[in-house]
Image (cartoon, coloured by chain):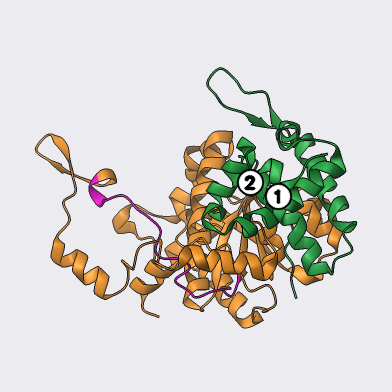
């Protein structure tokens, strides 16, 4: 089990918050962003780096990764499954899932979620 | 809109108003612009299939997705699937003779029915159709011209558009797309979610990096005339560059409206 407070110093989370521009928000706002990720990590029984490792294949000598198509697909589906358990209205369910995708995006995983379209 | 402004306003737009349909007459304008494109041998290099997003089943829409073309499929209300027609050389002789009869190709430039009837098959047509690289190279260039025209027409109609790669394996079967139609681009069309500035004109390198004149015995980078550059600003071929001051907040606003990652 992990908490949003613990994840605030996780390098992958710090990178996400900085890259997305959340690091200039209030601490409470940042925690709110991270809380959804923490809940997803607990749902999956993984830490943020482990979730990234599912999507990225081993770093090569030149410092480059490859995306794991299969891993990304698995994580994408896991995000949808998790979001569906939250009991939110459709818009907020989609936004919750895409908030977690934002963590992946800002750590180098190109992933696109579905939008909430009226 | 004047031509220069159309050229300057074209962007690769990625944020469409998903709830606003495109009028069919505007799609006709876009297709006619493609139909009027420059093309060698007066051949038909492109085929296009227009699809309204909401006419596709979820399975058909999902079959088009790939990692970089997914969200856009949910936002754009119209898809134009462009294909390169690899049988573009069919009918070349008839079209060329028609052009001779119309005074488009003239004897002053060496054209005659005799050349078309008796010489061109082995000298030109089979050189193209018998060489896979040449067949595809020429098809891609000429199809590209048609697609470029259609992009400009979309912006002239007040729409936005963007070209994407797409996965066509399933849709080919479902739509009975012939084998000789080679996938080119998926053009997504719709109204901008924001304004037509879409964050500002995209960065480009100075003309001198890519365009040259031949002087004496060497290439010299083209030197821009500041007065011409100013004229192009006034006529809106050159516009306010990206990022506009509000762009990042605008994108955040789009993301929050649509529940997307920020």
Q: Main secondary structure of the magenta part?
A: loop
Quarter of the image where one finds residue B161: bottom right
- Bounds of the magenta segment: B190-208
Q: Is residue A35 left or right of residue B154?
A: right
Chain of residue at mark 2? A
Q: Where is residue B92 in the image (x, y as percent from the top left)?
A: 55, 53
Report the residue at 50% width, 45% height from top.
B138
* Residue B171 in the image: above or below residue B135: below
The one of B53 and B261 positioned closer to us in this rendering: B261
Quarter of the image where one finds residue A50: top right
Label 1 close to label 2 by CB (< 8 Å) = yes
Q: Distance between the residues labelled 1 and 2?
A: 6 Å
The image's mark for residue B239 is none
Report the residue at 34% width, 67% height from top.
B240
The one of B128 and B163 positioned closer to us in this rendering: B163
Chain of residue at mark 1? A
Q: Where is residue A7 in the image (x, y as percent from the top left)?
A: 69, 42
Report the residue at 28% width, 75% height from top.
B235
The one of B196 and B227 positioned closer to us in this rendering: B196
Q: Position of residue B255 (x, y in %)?
A: 63, 64
Q: In this view of the protein, can residue B103 be seen by the observer?
A: no
Which image quarter is the N terminus of chain B in? bottom left
- Chain letter, green in picture: A
B56 is within the stretch colored magenta? no
The residue carrying mark 2 is A105
The image's mark for residue A101 is 1
Which image quarter is the C terminus of chain B in? bottom right
Q: Position of residue A26 (x, y in %)?
A: 57, 59
Which residue is situated farthest in the left direction here? B216
Q: In this view of the protein, can residue B232 be seen by the observer?
A: yes
The one of B213 and A54 positioned closer to us in this rendering: A54
- Chain letter, orange in picture: B
């Amino acid at each position: 089990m992990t908490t949003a407070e613990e994840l605030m110093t996780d390098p992958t989370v710090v990178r996400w918050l900085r890259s997305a521009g959340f690091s200039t928000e209030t601490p409470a706002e940042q925690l709110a962003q991270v809380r959804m990720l923490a809940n997803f990590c607990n749902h999956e029984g993984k830490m943020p780096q482990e979730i990234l490792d599912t999507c990225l294949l081993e770093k090569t000598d030149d410092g480059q990764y490859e995306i794991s198509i299969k891993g990304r697909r698995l994580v994408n589906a896991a995000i949808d499954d998790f979001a569906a358990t939250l009991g939110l209205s459709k818009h907020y369910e989609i936004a919750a899932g895409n908030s977690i995708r934002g963590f992946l995006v800002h750590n180098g995983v190109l992933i696109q979620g579905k939008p909430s379209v009226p | 809109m004047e031509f220069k402004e159309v050229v300057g306003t074209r962007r690769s737009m990625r944020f469409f108003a998903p709830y606003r349909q495109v009028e069919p007459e505007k799609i006709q304008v876009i297709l006619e612009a493609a139909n009027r494109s420059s093309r060698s041998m007066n051949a038909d290099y492109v085929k296009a299939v227009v699809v309204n997003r909401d006419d596709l089943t979820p399975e058909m829409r999902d079959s088009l997705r790939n990692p970089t073309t997914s969200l856009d499929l949910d936002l754009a209300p119209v898809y134009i699937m462009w294909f390169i027609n690899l049988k573009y050389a069919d009918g070349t002789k008839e079209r060329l003779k028609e052009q001779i009869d119309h005074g488009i190709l003239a004897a002053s430039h060496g054209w005659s029915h005799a050349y078309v009837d008796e010489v061109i098959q082995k000298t030109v047509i089979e050189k193209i159709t018998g060489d896979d690289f040449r067949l595809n190279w020429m098809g891609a260039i000429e199809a590209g011209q048609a697609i470029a025209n259609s992009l400009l027409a979309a912006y002239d109609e007040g729409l936005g558009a963007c070209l994407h790669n797409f996965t066509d394996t399933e849709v080919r079967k479902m739509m009975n797309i012939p084998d000789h139609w080679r996938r080119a681009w998926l053009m997504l069309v719709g109204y901008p979610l924001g304004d037509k500035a879409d964050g500002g004109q995209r960065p480009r390198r100075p003309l001198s990096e890519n365009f040259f004149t031949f002087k004496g015995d060497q290439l010299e980078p083209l030197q821009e005339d500041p007065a011409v550059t100013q004229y192009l600003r006034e006529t809106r071929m050159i516009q306010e560059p990206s990022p506009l001051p509000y762009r990042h907040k605008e994108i955040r606003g789009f993301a929050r409206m649509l529940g997307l990652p920020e």
